[in-house]
Image: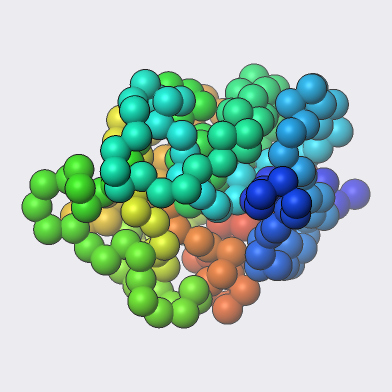
C-alpha cells in the first residue's frame, strides 16, 4: 500500500486550517497518500505515530523564541504558539519511533528547535556582513539562489550533486544545530539551508520550499519527495 503521510497545517485565528495545495500534490506525485493534520492534537500524538508512515512539517509563521531560550526581538514576526507546542511533540515522538520526517522552511526550523537547536530570529538583524535576499521577489517556483551541499550526507546522496538551486522565503534561520542533526547545506552567505540526522532512517529539514519547485518540474525537488516517500514505504 502507498504510505500514509501526515502534513501539518497553518492555523489562522482559530477559525480555519490552511495548507498550500503544492504540499499535497508533491506527496501524491511521489507515491504517498497525504493526510492533513490539524493543530491542537497533542493528546493524539501516540496514535498518529502508530498510524502514520511519515510526517511532513509544512511552512508557516515564526517560531516562538521562548522554545529556544530567548525573548522576542523587535524583528520577530507573527508566531503560532499552539502549533509550535504540538509540532515539537510530534517531532520528538516520530524521531523516537524512527519514522521519516521531512521539515520544510518553518518545519525545518521546528525540527531543529525540538531537539535543542537555536535560531536567528531575524537574519538581517543578527548576522553580520552581507546577507542574500532570502525573501525572493519572484514567483514561488523561481529558483533564486544556490545551496552548497556537504559531501557524504544524506542530502548529497539524494541529489547526487554538490550544489542545487532553490527558492527562498524566510527571514529566520537555524543558528546552532540540535543533536542528532548535522548541517547538510548552506547558502553562499553562510546561512544553514539544510540539516539531517545521521542516526535516523530519514529526518531531514530544508529551508526552501521544494513543494513549489517540484510541482513546476524541478528534478532535485522531485528527488527529495521521492526519497521521503520511499523511506515512508
How was this image coloured? rainbow
Q: Residue at x 75, y 51 (%)?
A: 15
Question: Residue 100 versus residue 72: which sits nearer the camera?
Answer: 72
Q: Is residue 139 visible?
A: yes
Quadrant in the picture for residue 160: bottom left
Measuring from the top left, give residue 38's x and y in whole percent.
76, 43
Q: Residue at x 34, y 34 (%)?
A: 72
Horizontal side of residue 145 vs 2, given as left or right: left
Measuring from the top left, give residue 35's x and y in whole percent.
81, 50
Quadrant in the picture for residue 22: bottom right
Horizontal side of residue 151 vs 212, given as left or right: left
Count of picture labels: 0
Horizontal side of residue 172 vs 40, given as left or right: left
Is residue 218 positioned above or below 186 on the image? below
Q: Is residue 227 visible?
A: no
Q: Quadrant of the C terminus?
A: top right
Question: Residue 162 versus residue 114: which sits nearer the camera?
Answer: 114
Measuring from the top left, give residue 232's x and y in whole percent.
73, 43
Measuring from the top left, give residue 111's x and y in whole percent.
51, 35
Is residue 5 positioned above or below 136 on the image? above
Q: Residue at x 32, y 41 (%)?
A: 121
Q: Residue at x 54, y 52 (%)?
A: 60
Question: Residue 6 versus residue 86: which sits nearer the camera?
Answer: 86
Amino acid at each position: 500500500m502507498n504510505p500514509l503521510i501526515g502534513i501539518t497545517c497553518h492555523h489562522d485565528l482559530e477559525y480555519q486550517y490552511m495548507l498550500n495545495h503544492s504540499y499535497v500534490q508533491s506527496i501524491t506525485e511521489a507515491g504517498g497518500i497525504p493526510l492533513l493534520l490539524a493543530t491542537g492534537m497533542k493528546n493524539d500524538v501516540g496514535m498518529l505515530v502508530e498510524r502514520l508512515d511519515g510526517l511532513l512539517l509544512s511552512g508557516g509563521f515564526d517560531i516562538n523564541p521562548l522554545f529556544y531560550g530567548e525573548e522576542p526581538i523587535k524583528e520577530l514576526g507573527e508566531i503560532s504558539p499552539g502549533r509550535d507546542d504540538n509540532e515539537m511533540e510530534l517531532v520528538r515522538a516520530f524521531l523516537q519511533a524512527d519514522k521519516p520526517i521531512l521539515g520544510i522552511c518553518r518545519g525545518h526550523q521546528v525540527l531543529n528547535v525540538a531537539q535543542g537547536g537555536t535560531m536567528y530570529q531575524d537574519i538581517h538583524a543578527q548576522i553580520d556582513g552581507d546577507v542574500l535576499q532570502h525573501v525572493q521577489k519572484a514567483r514561488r517556483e523561481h529558483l533564486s539562489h544556490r545551496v552548497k551541499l556537504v559531501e557524504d550526507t544524506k542530502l548529497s546522496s539524494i541529489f547526487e550533486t554538490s550544489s542545487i538551486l532553490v527558492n527562498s522565503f524566510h527571514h529566520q534561520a537555524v543558528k546552532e544545530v540540535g543533536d542528532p542533526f548535522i548541517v547538510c547545506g548552506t547558502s553562499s552567505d553562510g546561512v544553514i539551508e539544510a540539516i539531517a540526522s545521521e542516526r535516523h532512517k530519514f529526518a531531514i529539514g530544508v529551508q526552501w520550499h521544494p513543494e513549489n519547485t517540484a510541482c513546476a518540474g524541478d528534478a532535485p525537488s522531485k528527488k527529495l519527495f521521492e526519497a521521503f516517500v520511499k523511506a515512508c514505504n
